[in-house]
Amino acid sequence: MLSPAAPALPATRLSHVVRLQAEPYRADGEPFAGAEEAWFWAVQAQDAKAAGARIVAGRGLVERPCEPQDVLRVVDRLYRTRKLLRDHLHVLVHYGRRQSAPEPDRFREQRAHSLWQEAFEVIAPALREKGIAR
């Protein structure tokens, strides 16, 4: 309980203005050339982590503006907001592990190619907005 004799706070210490930066998602490092490159990098890092590798920031040949988990979080968020379907995720993971996009000329990969294109039409703007890809 407060005593009635407690001194009041000085008026100069009650509040102050905090200026926001013009670029909320400014990140140091070289952004990826495209969303597909970022996806292949994230999948490769996730597979290495599952195999027991320890991921340490700043140890690669090129400094990147994010962690591999950041790319996976973007895709997860798009899936949870129903902008990506389960079929998109299956194609992304399968061809991400192969480290190559599906080829539209191969009969068995035509459907996968169309799903791949649809997925990256949604993923690319989200990664560009965060400064991860150009």
Image (cartoon, rainbow, N blue to C red):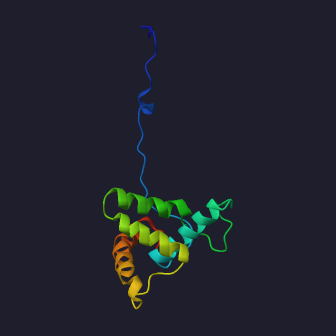
Left or right side of 33 for 77: left
Left or right side of 47 for 120: left
Total number of numbered labels? 0
Q: Nearer the viewer, residue 37 or 87?
A: 87
Residue drawn at the location 40% of the way across and 91% of the way down: 105
Viewport quadrant of the N terminus = top left
* Residue 77 horizontal/vertical position (percent): 39, 58
Q: Residue furthest front?
A: 108
Q: Residue furthest left?
A: 82
Residue most extreme to the bottom: 105
User: Is 53 in front, or is 93?
Assistant: 93
Above or below: residue 64 compared with residue 110: above
Residue under the point 37% across and 84% down = 110
Please name the residue shown 46% across and 16% down the image. 7
Q: Quadrant of the C terminus?
A: bottom left
Q: Position of residue 36 (x, y in %)?
A: 47, 76
Residue 37 coordinates in the image, percent (x, y): 51, 77
Give residue 80's quadrant in the image: bottom left
- Between 12 and 21, the residue placed more toward the observer is 21
Give residue 9's quadrant in the image. top left
**Can residue 127 be seen here?**
no
Q: Is 55 in front, or is 104?
A: 104
- Tell me where residue 33 appears, x and y as whole percent: 49, 79
Residue 68 appears in the rendering: yes
